Image (cartoon, rainbow, N blue to C red):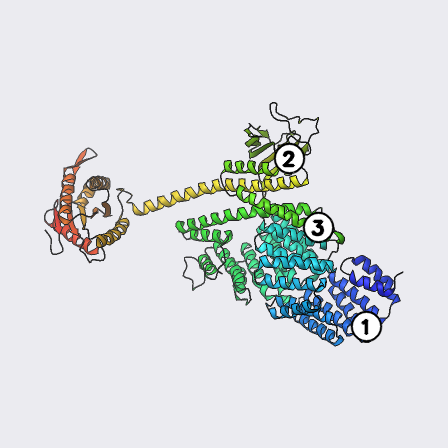
Amino acid sequence: MPSPELLLELAWLTRQDEADQVEALLARLEPLVGIEAVARVLLIRAELAWLAARLDEALELIQQADAGFAAVANPAGRGDVALLRSRVVHDQGLPDERQIALDQALACYQQAGDLYRQTACRVWLAVDKAFLSEPAALALASSDVHQHFAEDPALNGLLYYARGLFQFIEGEYQACRPAFDEGARLLLDAGLVRQVLPCLANAGGAMGNLGDTGAQTLYVEQALTLARPRRWPLNMGAALYTLSDVYQTLGQLDQALKAAREARHWLQSLKRSRVFVIAVALLGEVCARLQLLDESRGAFEESLAAAEAGGHLDLMPRVLSGLAECLARLGEIAEALRLAHGALQVPTLIDFENRHRALLALAHIYVRHPDLPGPSEHAAPSPALHYLDLVAAQRTPDWQPDDDYLATCALAWEQVGDAVKALQFERRRIEALNRENTQRATRQIATTSARHEAENAQREAAYQRELLATERRKLAILESLGAIGQEITATPDLHAIFATLSRHAGTLLDVAGLRVWLAEGDHLVPAYSVEGSNTTPGPVIALDDPKSNSARAFRERRELLVEFGPDEQDPRHIPGTLPMHTLLFAPLTVGPRMLGVISIQSSRVHAYGEVEQLVFRNIAAYSAVALGNALNYQMLSESHQELVQTQEELERHATVDALTGLHNRRYLMWCAARNVERAARTRQPLTLLMVDLDFFKSINDSHGHAAGDLALTEAARILKTCVRPDDVVARYGGEEFVLLLPGTPLPRAAEVAERIRLAIARQSMEFEELRLRVTVSIGVADWQPGEPDLDNTLRRADQALYLAKAAGRNTVKVSAATGVE
């Protein structure tokens, strides 16, 4: 049997890898060793209790181990105790006590003269300082490691982890990924599995921040593969939280809910920790999206209590905003507003993100309840728009408005009756959705592949590096497929999608035939069917057809591989077509929506192995997103056209007189301003005619308003026939009309006025067996250079019209700048 000292060393080195075996080894070892070794045994057990989230037990064992090392005057052992205590109190949500414990550990290691442990403690200090953006600690630790322990995997692994944290917090997501990757590799070599997990989690978080949720999912699955057999609550909870967040991003809410609930279950013993706060807050957000409002409220209240107990001030705005929106939807408006305003008052380092959450929560509340009184100081058309304006005003340079913000803006403008601005925001929302749909294609494919591969992942520690290398290779395959996916999803045209799909499928796989069916009612209708280079008619298939593989793939929502031997033939083979021996079918799904089925066929036996199926699975996912985009584009185009037509109709009604069909006074004044500016610039004349129907009141009094309306419409018709296309004819009000004649000098305008007078006087109208005649009086005036607008010209034309009336009506009077003729 090996010596007790050797067994103790073995237990220390494998304490994070084989917990059950280590416990059994310690049970046999403890009676055989002295006080100092017993203290080391207690310390190992304390670490195992910490990993299992039995924190009170861990602290009790730490105290006993410290007493043992103190009894034999072992400062290095006491430093190990303090270092482990720093990690336990960190998980308890006690950052101040963690700093004290790290300082104690460093002092003990300095007393012992242990350079290795001093360096390790400085690296841990650098990890802590990363969260405070203090790079001096990292520089000091890096110098010590490179000078004295350049080849040590544990110290270098921790150093890469600390460096990755600094880059992550500074927003250098692309740069931090290699640091976390190298840190994970080295720490795994050193047996520090517990620290490998945050390396993977942060690398995944960086990829998620870059929009690559496929790579993020791969990292999460790797972390879960390491954590599940060890059943470490903190790491399980953190990984499941991240997985839930990815599912929520992809719109897979049922899976997001399942992962979030499991994360909360694992974290129950860590209720003061940051990860518990954010995991339970995420559960509240997912429940709210699924309309599980009571569960959502409970989750947010639990998260709020944990944030307050743990002192996690920077997480409070997220929790308060989420709880506010939940309460608003439950009808508790006053409390919801109080919480949302409270979220705005929390002082944090991440001011933009937290204020964004709180302001958007207030906007949501006021959009759902537009009759609520808003803040007294707001100048926007509505309280919702006030808070949306604040969101935009405090944006960062790289902020891009998302679908939620744009949709809320569109609805808020629609509520205040501004269809034009509502349409503008709706158009921006459509553009944002199209971008998100394209990005979602890559994320969905990567997630599907990651989950498929994670099911086959080996859990044994000896195979972890091989697993990581395999996942990297598969990620490279996905990246090459990404370019194909971008081309497939780049067009909303169905025929272009099918042509692109056919071209790429043939380059990646052995494809003798390709068919796509779209679901219509109770049938699958062929949308695209080729065999070789020839288009073939595809069959219409009933969804309940028990013999159809396409219908089965649709009904069961899963991929099917159908193979026939060299001497076998597909019983559904269509005579005259090439016999196929390997067939793959996959449903085309976008979230819960079933679009149809895609199938590829090969005349070779066993043509599609695991790699080919992976490629086909990805192509099917891209195709589903592309088809969904195309169908959504058709729907949005139709809605957009309707909105444009509505806008045009509103604009026409706003500028046209309903009775006469002429332009109205509003349009006239708009044209007047433009024509004055043009006349001033070109020095061309500009004249104006003011036309008034004579004795119009007598017509209404004698024959009724119908006769008056007929006189107005007939006069309007004649006016339009007497002028040029560029002239403006408008109903000014009542029985008055104004004609704007650009480029026409005053004498010529007088001739036009006389022509109009004669044309109307000669026209008779039939009204209820009567023949009515009307006459008009007309005042003519011209715009004078230097006048800023047509107000004086209108006044002079009105004076001339008055003189025409006074002169007996049915006449024309011309006003010059100096008088009236």
Please tell me the numbered disc located at residue 584. 2
Q: Position of residue 181 (x, y in %)?
A: 65, 57
Q: Secondary structure at mark 2?
A: strand
Lower sequence index among marks 1 and 2: 1
The image quadrant where one finds the N terminus is bottom right
Residue 115's place in the image compared with 761, above or below, is: below
Residue bearing the label numbered 3: 467
Q: Is residue 627 visible?
A: yes
User: What is the three-letter code of the residue carrying label 3?
Assistant: Leu
Of circles 1 and 2, the one toward us is 2
Q: Position of residue 545 (x, y in %)?
A: 63, 29
Q: Position of residue 488 (x, y in %)?
A: 54, 41
Residue nearer the viewer, 645 or 306:
645
Could you tell me which secondary element the residue under label 3 belongs to? helix
Q: Does 767 appear above or below 729?
A: above
Please say if the residues under marks 3 and 1 sit with CB atoms less than 8 Å apart. Answer: no
Between residues 108 and 641, which one lies in front from this camera angle?
108
In the image, is 133 to the left or to the right of 79? left
**Residue visible at 65% across and 67% down in the picture:** 142
N-term-proximal mark, 2 vs 3: 3
Marks 1 and 2, how far apart at CA: 66 Å
Give the residue type that dot 1 points to. Gly
* Inter-mark Cα distance, 3 to 1: 41 Å
Q: Which mark is residue 195?
A: none
Q: Is residue 640 left or right of residue 687?
A: right
User: Can you tell which mark lies on residue 68?
Assistant: 1
**Which x, y percent locates residue 393?**
45, 61
Q: Amino acid at mark 2?
A: Leu
Q: Is residue 298 visible?
A: no
Q: Is residue 538 left or right of residue 385?
A: right
Do tag 1 and tag 2 residues touch (Cβ < 8 Å)?
Answer: no
